[in-house]
């Protein structure tokens, strides 16, 4: 019993799925027929709701092909209901979705149809140039004769609207040449338009073509076409001065419009009767009202396609701009890399050069100390032992001190230990009975923030300033003030010596070169009899 129940359950479940799928297919077929040949506005409204849901579901499933199909049907319904701006929006949305399709043939087929529909919409909006643009775009893409005939017929209608009957006739004749390959509906449409253009130009065969088109439309029971034929026949007889026959055909058109129950056809046929039966004032009022309505429609048109075109141009521009910026940034990056390599290399070279200078100075100092100073000391010792004159001894002692000072000036610097003490030892060495050296805030400096090269440079620069002071300034006091902010430091040097005009040569030039080598700076300020100042920044 249990297996039988399971089998029956699957059977009934399968039947439900099949019926649901069948119902969906039947609904699609039914509403598709409604769009092509609506019987009433209620039917169109139901079809609109159905295809709106279908479109939303297709977009959720990312089924672009079906979404485009549903949007085109929605655009067609909106056009039939007089919602021109909405129809334009749906068409443009379908155009956007085409960018996500991969099948070239499907893209082309849909683009032809959408361009043609936009041409119809813009014709209804009385925008001749845009309508002609889209009809022409579509005509460039089509290959089959039936589609070419449709587009030629549509372009002919544009020229009919502008009362350019001779130009319209050229397009209708070219379209009619393809009539053997057209279905009856399309053949009747081309024949009817051809007869109308001929009638406006008072050419023979106009009436027979109009009547033949009406007969074909009745044969296939195409009510909208029958209404159009009655309207054109009414125009034909009105132009001939036969108002009675014109009114008769206009009345027949109204009866068919009532049967179709379409507001657009009802309004159009009633307007024709009003013009035929009304006074000149009524006719003038009707024309004025139509003109104002067209102007209002054009004013309300949201120009969705123009926005689409702009967005496409913007997208292409942004892509081009992105590529240009990418190339530009790549070029900048390459330049920066080369500059960085050059700068790093230059800095490295300068550092190596400076280190070599310090190494040379240290080597000279050692050589002076080991060889010259020691030799001088030995000479002095021998002279003392031989009781030579004090004058010679004093002179030799002075030479010894000079060599010792040279050795000290260029000796190796201890930058690994307590650098504040190393500096203080240097500066105190210049403190004597004649000059008082005052050092402020040096103990507050955290030398861990500075490299060995920077410390060595500071030592040599301060040494150069102090030697310069001892040789030239005749100062009685010197003040050095240290001030640190993070990894930056300022040292202010001031003395009360005789001062001098600033000439950057010799020792001063050396200090400036040394500071530049570590990306620091030194500036000088001095006048005769006004002391000397130096500002060091690193």
Image (cartoon, rainbow, N blue to C red):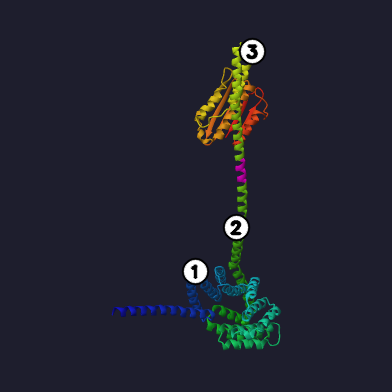
The correct choice, above or below, for 366 with respect to 40 in the image is above
Q: Is residue 40 left or right of residue 496?
A: left
- The answer to which quarter of the image holds residue 255 is bottom right
Residue occupied by mark 1: 62
Residue occupied by mark 3: 391
The correct choice, above or below, for 160 with respect to 388 in the image is below
The correct choice, above or below, for 62 with respect to 282 in the image is above
Using the rendered image of the protein, determine whether residue 495 is visible from the camera's viewpoint. Answer: no
Secondary structure beneath disc 1?
loop
Residue occupied by mark 2: 322
Please state the extent of the stretch shown in magenta in the rendering: 339-346
Q: Is residue 84 magenta?
A: no
Q: Nearer the viewer, residue 471 or 370?
A: 370
Position of the N terminus by quadrant: bottom left
Q: Is residue 345 magenta?
A: yes
N-term mark: 3 or 1: 1
Secondary structure beneath disc 2?
helix
N-term mark: 1 or 2: 1
Q: Quote the CA–CA distance across marks 3 and 2.
A: 86 Å
Query: Label 1: few (<14), some or many (≥20) within 10 Å?
Result: few
């Amino acid at each position: 019993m249990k297996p039988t129940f399971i089998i029956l359950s699957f059977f009934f479940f399968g039947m439900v799925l099949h019926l649901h799928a069948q119902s969906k297919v039947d609904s699609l077929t039914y509403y598709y027929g409604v769009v092509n040949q609506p019987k009433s506005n209620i039917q169109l409204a139901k079809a609109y709701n159905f295809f709106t849901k279908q479109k939303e579901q297709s977009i959720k499933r990312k089924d672009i092909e079906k979404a485009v199909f549903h949007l085109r049907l929605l655009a067609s319904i909106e056009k039939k209901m007089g919602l021109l701006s909405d129809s334009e929006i749906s068409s443009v949305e379908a155009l956007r979705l085409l960018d996500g399709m991969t099948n070239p043939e499907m893209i082309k087929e849909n683009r032809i149809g959408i361009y043609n529909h936009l041409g119809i919409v813009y014709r209804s909006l009385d925008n001749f140039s845009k309508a002609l643009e889209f009809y022409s775009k579509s005509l460039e893409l089509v290959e089959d004769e039936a589609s070419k005939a449709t587009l030629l017929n549509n372009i002919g209608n544009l020229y009919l609207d502008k009362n350019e009957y001779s130009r319209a006739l050229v397009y209708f004749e070219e379209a009619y040449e393809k009539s053997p390959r057209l279905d009856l509906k399309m053949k009747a449409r081309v024949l009817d338009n051809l007869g109308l253009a001929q009638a406006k130009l008072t050419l023979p065969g106009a009436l027979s073509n109009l009547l033949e088109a009406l007969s074909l439309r009745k044969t296939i029971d195409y009510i909208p076409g029958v209404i159009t034929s009655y309207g054109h026949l009414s125009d034909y007889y009105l132009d001939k001065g036969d108002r009675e026959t014109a009114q008769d055909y206009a009345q027949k058109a109204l009866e068919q419009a009532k049967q179709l129950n379409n507001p657009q056809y009802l309004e159009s046929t009633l307007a024709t009767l009003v013009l035929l039966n009304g006074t000149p004032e009524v006719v003038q009022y009707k024309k004025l009202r139509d003109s104002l309505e067209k102007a209002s429609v054009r004013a309300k048109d949201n120009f969705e396609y123009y926005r689409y075109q702009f967005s496409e141009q913007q997208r292409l521009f942004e892509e081009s701009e992105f590529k240009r910026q990418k190339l530009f940034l790549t070029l900048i990056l390459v330049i920066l890399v080369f500059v960085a390599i050059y700068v790093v290399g230059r800095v490295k070279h300068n550092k190596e050069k400076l280190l070599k200078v310090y190494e040379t100075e240290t080597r000279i100092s050692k050589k002076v100390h080991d060889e010259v100073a020691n030799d001088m000391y030995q000479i002095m010792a021998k002279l003392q032992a031989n009781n030579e004159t004090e004058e010679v001894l004093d002179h030799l002692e002075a030479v010894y001190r000079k060599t010792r000072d040279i050795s000290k000036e260029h000796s190796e610097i201890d930058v690994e230990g307590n650098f504040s003490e190393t500096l203080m030892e240097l500066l105190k060495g210049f403190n004597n009975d004649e000059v008082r050296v005052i050092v402020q805030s040096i103990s507050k400096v955290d030398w861990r923030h500075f490299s060995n090269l920077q410390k060595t440079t500071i030592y040599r620069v301060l040494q150069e300033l102090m030697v310069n002071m001892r040789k030239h300034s005749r100062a009685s006091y010197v003040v050095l003030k240290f001030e640190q902010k993070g990894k930056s430091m300022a040292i202010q040097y001031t003395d009360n010596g005789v001062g001098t005009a600033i000439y950057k040569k010799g020792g001063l030039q050396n200090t400036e070169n040394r500071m530049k080598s570590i990306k620091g700076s030194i500036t000088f300020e001095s006048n005769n009899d006004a002391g000397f100042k130096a500002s060091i920044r690193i």
